Image (cartoon, rainbow, N blue to C red):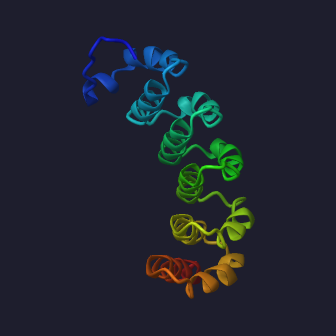
Amino acid sequence: MTDETVTLTADVLEAPQALPALQEALTDPDPTVRRLVVGALDFFRDLSLAEPLLQMLADPEWQVQQETAIVLGRLGSATAGLALLQALRDPYWQVVKEAVTALGSLRYVAAPDVLLALGANPQVDIRKVVAWALGEIGQPEARACLERLMMDEDAEVRRAATHALTQITLV
């Protein structure tokens, strides 16, 4: 990060002329800068940013990958699905959690098989977002997994699974 202080407001971030400089900053050697730039790209909600963001899912720093998964989920790009599925193998549970959330937000129908396996993950936060994502995706084959999650030891996981099951039933 440079010694220069820059104030980023929504007006500055949403200005089209800021986009090239932000995209260039995705290669900054400082992972904090890269993570902040990925977050700043969220202000644009521009589908043309999907490709550079997909590359950021392979960043060596897990915090950058985590922020990228969040932004890709909000962006709504269907092309992000395969890369987000690959992110489910990340060793950091925080990256996996946000990739699951993004897949649910995208209602990525190719995801249920992988998500069903994550329903047994030891990390409570992952089981909770898996239940939510399965409900968002709405595939009937998720019922058995959601029924198991309705018996989970964690109350939030049980609530998410119950709600998800009602979403699937309504479909």
- For the point 52% across and 48% down, the residue is 73
Residue 167 position within the rendered picture, expressed as x and y whole percent measured from the top left = 53, 78
Above/below status of 117 relative to 24: below
* Horizontal side of residue 87 vs 40, given as left or right: right
- For the point 46% across and 32% down, the residue is 35
Residue 80 found in image quarter:
top right
- Nearest the camera: 30 or 10? 30
Residue 45 found in image quarter:
top left
* Horizontal side of residue 35 vs 93, given as left or right: left
Residue 6 position within the rendered picture, expressed as x and y whole percent measured from the top left = 27, 17
- Nearest the camera: 15 or 87? 87
Instruction: Give the number of callouts.
Output: 0
- For the point 48% across and 41% down, the residue is 67
Residue 145 position within the rendered picture, expressed as x and y whole percent measured from the top left = 67, 79
Quadrant that contains the N terminus? top left
Residue 14 position within the rendered picture, expressed as x and y whole percent measured from the top left = 34, 27
- For the point 53% across and 18% down, the residue is 29
Quadrant that contains the C terminus? bottom right
Above/below status of 30 relative to 116: above
